[in-house]
Image (cartoon, helix red, strand yellow):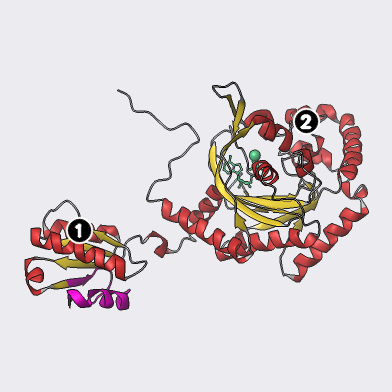
Amino acid sequence: MSTLQAIRGMNDILPDASPVWQYLEGQVKAVLDQYGYREIRMPVVEPTALFERGVGEHTDIVEKEMYTFDDRGGDSLTLRPEGTAGCVRAALQNGLLHNQVQRLWYQGPMFRYERPQKGRYRQFYQIGAETFGIATPDVDAELILLTARMLDNLGLTEHVTLNLNTLGSSEARGRYRKALVDYLETVKDKLDADSQNRLYSNPMRILDSKSESTQALLDDAPTFDDYLDDESREHFETLCRLLDKAGINYTINPRLVRGLDYYSRTVFEWITDSLGAQGTVCGGGRYDGLVPMLGGKPTPAAGFALGIERLILMLETLNKIPASVFNTVDAYVIMAGSAAEEAGMALAEQLRSDVPGLRVQSHCGGGSFKSQMKKADKSGARIALILGEQEVQDRTVGIKFLREEKEQQSIGWDELSKAIQELI
Ligand code: ATP
Ligand code: MG
C-alpha cells in the first residue's frame, strides 16, 4: 500500500524542531504576560459568514484563500484564515465587550489556500493580540512597544523595521477612495492585471501592489494625507510622539494599507529583508469598525498578529537560537543488570519528585553498558547516572559528566537528590 502524505503546504513540526517553537512561543507569551494580556482560545472552524463579513468580501483572503466546505448538516464552515474575526465573535457572544476593557491574546493554526513557498504555507501559525474598549492612541503605542520588546528579546531588533501609516476615518477613506479611482481610471490600461481587477472592488489595495509599473503610476496619484480627517491626524501624531518618546524607530509609509477590510486609522507592519519576498513578520492596527460590523455596539479595538514560521526562519537564518534551547534532557540513567534496572527506576522517580524541573531520561530496553552510554551522549544530557551490580550492592550511583572535564563521582542513594540539586 502506498503511504499517505500530508497536504501540500501543511507541515509536520518534528521533535528536533519543536524546541525552537517552544522557545519562541515562550518568549512571546512572557512579554504578553508582562503587559497584562490574557489568553483566549477560539475554535479553528467558524461559520463562513463570519469571515465574509469580518475580513471583507473583496480581500485576497475571502476571494481566493479560504478553506470552505459544507458540513454534513449543510452549513457552510471555514477553517479560520486569521484570528481577529473569531476573537471578536467570541468576545461578543460571551459578553466580554460591554463597558469593558479587554487585552486578549491567542495562538494557533490559521489556514489559507496560497501557493506554498518559503515563509508561506497553507497551515501556518500565528500569535495575535487584540484590545477592546480603548479609543486613544496610547494602546496603539502599547501594542507596538510590546511587539518591539518581543523582537528585541529574540535578538531581532536590528533586522526589522517598523512601517507605520494611518488610514483615517471611514469617511476620509471613502472620499480618498473616490479620488484614487478617478485618477486610476485615467491610467487603467497601464495597471497590472491584479490592480485592474481591484479598481472598483478594493482600490486601496492597489497602493501596496507589488508591481513596479503600478507603483510608478501611483507617484502621480492623489495622496491620502490631503483627505485625512483632523481627529485621525491628531490620533496619528500622538502615536508618533509616544513612539518617539519610547525610542522606537519607524518609517511612515503612506502606501501601507494591509490586506484586510477592517482596519481604520493606525496600521503597522514589522518587516525584515532577511527572508526574501515573505518579509512581513508581524502586522496589526486599529479596527474600530469591526465590532459593529459583526453585530456589536461600536467598540474601539486594535491588535496585531505575528507569523511564527517567519520568525523562526529569521532566528535560524540569523543564528539567533541559543544553544541551550536544544537541551531537553539533564540526566540520563544507565542501568546494567536486572537489580540495577529495578533500583534505577525507583531512583529516577525519586529524583523527579525531589528536584523540580529536572529532566531525567531513564534508559529503557536493556542493552550493553557501552550502547547505553552512546544513547546517553546522544540524548544531550549533561550527566549520566550509572547503576551496575556493584553500585546496587554499595547503594551508590556513579555520576559521569558528559559535557565537561570533571572526574566521575560516586554518591550514596540517600544523598543523590541533594547532590544533583547542587550540580544542576
Ligand atoms: P502577506 O502579505 O505576506 O501575505 P498578510 O498581510 O496576508 O501577509 P496577515 O493577514 O497580516 O498577513 O497575517 C499576519 C502575519 O501572519 C503575516 O505578517 C505573516 O507573518 C503571517 N502569515 C500570513 N500568511 C501566511 C502564510 N500563508 N504562511 C505563513 N505565514 C503567514
Ligand atoms: Mg497574504
Determine whether the residue tagged by mark 2 lies in a helix, strand or loop. helix
Residue 220 placement (x, y as % from top left): 88, 41
- Segment tinted magenta in the rendering: 398-424
Residue 240 placement (x, y as % from top left): 80, 62
Point 41% across, 63% down: residue = 323
Q: Is residue 278 magenta?
A: no
Q: Which residue is mark 2?
A: 198
Determine whether the residue tagged by mark 1 lies in a helix, strand or loop. helix
- Mark 1 residue CB less than 8 A from any atom of ligand 1: no
Viewer can see residue 366: yes
Residue 7 left/right relative to 86 = left
Foreground pick, 331 / 373? 331
Marking on residue 374: 1
Residue 286 left/right relative to 87 = right
Q: Is residue 404 magenta?
A: yes
Viewer can see residue 272: no
Marking on residue 94: none
**Which is nearer the N-term, disc 1 or disc 2?**
2
Q: Amino acid at mark 1?
A: Lys
Residue 379 placement (x, y as % from top left): 28, 58
Q: Quadrant of ligand 2?
A: top right
Q: Amino acid at mark 2?
A: Arg
**Badge 1 vs badge 2, beta-carbon distance below 8 Å:** no
In the displayed structure, 101 sits above or below 122; it is below
Give how far apart the Cα atoms at labels 1 and 2 are: 62 Å
